[in-house]
């Protein structure tokens, strides 16, 4: 994720902070300062920092549980909407997924319990009845309870949605379970959005929108994965491709793209092995600064990931999901025979769904 700052790492997993989160901190600090002076600003910033420490603990609840089942986490990124743990391998067995989903909210319940024991129930009751001037720690206790409850809403992309899918998957299989869980997520999001809209709560409308699209993307992601699991790389590759040789220049690339709907051009060496990809973006940038006589070898993104034609399509999908623009499919000698892109996969999925009707 671009524009983020690494704070440090816990157990080899980097904790990063997105710049929008820093902007949120600055905004809250400044507006509190404006209203209540330096003390109010300090308290508000301390509250957000403590809250996000709890969010990091929540994410590490998921991460530690996932690691027990062989899950591998890249990093944790803090966004204004919460934390995101980016996992490259996610446990998909229903029972494992259930435990991983519940481990996050469980951490917040534990934090709530510990703080409750420390401050006593009276302070907490006063917090709920809206008294002011209470210690920061009681606000943090309530916030952890809210975090746990909110995350357990049975809708993607919340943890509760994953837990629900895992429970349904025990009986119905992952695909059907995902569809049902996504539908419940849509209904919940629409209800929440309407409530926010008529109750005059714009934040709730924003959260509802987030849940609605989260549910859709989870459903289509799962569909794509189960679809890909039956196929090989060559089943999904584009074969009518314009390619460029090592001596080609940018104006050759412009010629090629003008007469096709292709987005990216594989660049091959003298024996036909892929050495890189000239994307439309890279082409536009290089044209702007170097002109049409510039070498495509200089302008391309070097090092295209490659797979054999018989490799499972899942492996191409994994490459695309971790940021590759395309995956080259090669024959035994390493020469290019096709290209798998997010677009080619999307088209294939669309066609298969139409044929299935
Ligand atoms: Zn979570």
Image (tube, rainbow, N blue to C red):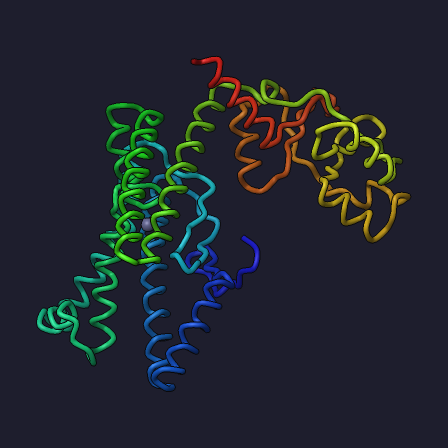
Q: Position of residue 258 (x, y in %)?
A: 79, 32
* Residue 255 percent coordinates (x, y): 84, 33
Residue sitting at 82 percent across and 40 percent down?
A: 296
Quadrant in which residue 32 is drawn = bottom left
For the residue pair 305 and 261, the one nearer the viewer reads as 261
Quadrant of the image for the C terminus?
top left
Work out whether 277 lies above or below 177.
below
Q: Position of residue 343 (x, y in %)?
A: 59, 30
Q: Nearer the viewer, residue 314 or 344?
A: 344
* Left or right: residue 330 compared with residue 102: right
Q: Is residue 260 visible?
A: yes
Q: Is residue 101 above or below residue 242?
A: below
Give the residue furthest to the left: 122
Residue 201 as seen in the image, left or right of residue 266 = left
Q: Which residue sits at x=91%, y=43%?
A: 293
Residue located at (50% from left, 17% from top): 352
- Residue at x 63% of width, y 23% of height: 237
Q: Residue furthest right?
A: 293
From the viewer's perspective, tell me whether residue 148 is left or right of residue 231.
left
Residue 100 in view, yes or no: no
């Amino acid at each position: 994720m671009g524009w983020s700052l690494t704070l440090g790492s816990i157990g080899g997993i980097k904790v990063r902070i997105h710049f929008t989160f820093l902007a949120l901190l600055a905004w809250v600090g400044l507006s509190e300062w404006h209203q209540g002076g330096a003390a109010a600003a300090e308290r508000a910033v301390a509250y957000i920092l403590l809250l996000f420490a709890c969010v990091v603990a929540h994410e590490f609840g998921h991460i530690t549980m996932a690691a027990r089942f062989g899950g591998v986490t890249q990093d944790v990124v803090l966004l204004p909407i919460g934390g995101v743990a980016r996992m490259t391998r996610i446990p998909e067995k229903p029972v494992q997924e259930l435990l991983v989903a519940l481990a996050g909210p469980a951490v917040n319940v534990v934090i709530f319990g510990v703080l409750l024991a420390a401050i006593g129930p009276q302070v907490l009751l006063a917090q709920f009845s809206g008294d002011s001037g209470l210690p920061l720690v009681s606000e943090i206790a309530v916030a952890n309870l809210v975090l746990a409850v909110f995350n357990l809403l049975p809708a993607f992309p919340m943890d509760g949605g994953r837990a629900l899918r895992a429970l349904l998957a025990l009986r119905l299989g992952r695909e059907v379970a995902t569809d049902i869980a996504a539908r419940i997520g849509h209904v919940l999001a629409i209800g929440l959005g309407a409530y926010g809209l008529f109750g005059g709560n714009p934040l709730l409308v924003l959260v509802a929108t987030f849940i609605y699209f989260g549910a859709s993307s989870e459903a289509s992601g799962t569909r794509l994965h189960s679809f890909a699991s039956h196929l090989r790389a060559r089943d999904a590759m584009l074969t009518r491709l314009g390619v460029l040789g090592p001596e080609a220049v940018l104006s050759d690339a412009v010629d090629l793209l003008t007469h096709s709907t292709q987005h990216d051009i594989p660049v091959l060496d003298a024996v036909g092995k892929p050495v890189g990809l000239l994307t439309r973006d890279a082409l536009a940038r290089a044209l702007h600064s170097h002109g049409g006589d510039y070498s495509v070898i200089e302008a391309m993104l070097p090092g295209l990931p490659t797979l054999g034609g018989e490799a499972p399509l899942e492996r191409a999908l994994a490459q695309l999901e971790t940021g590759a623009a395309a995956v080259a499919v090669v024959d035994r000698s390493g020469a290019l025979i096709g290209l798998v892109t997010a677009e080619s996969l999307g088209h294939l999925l669309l066609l298969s769904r139409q044929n299935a009707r």
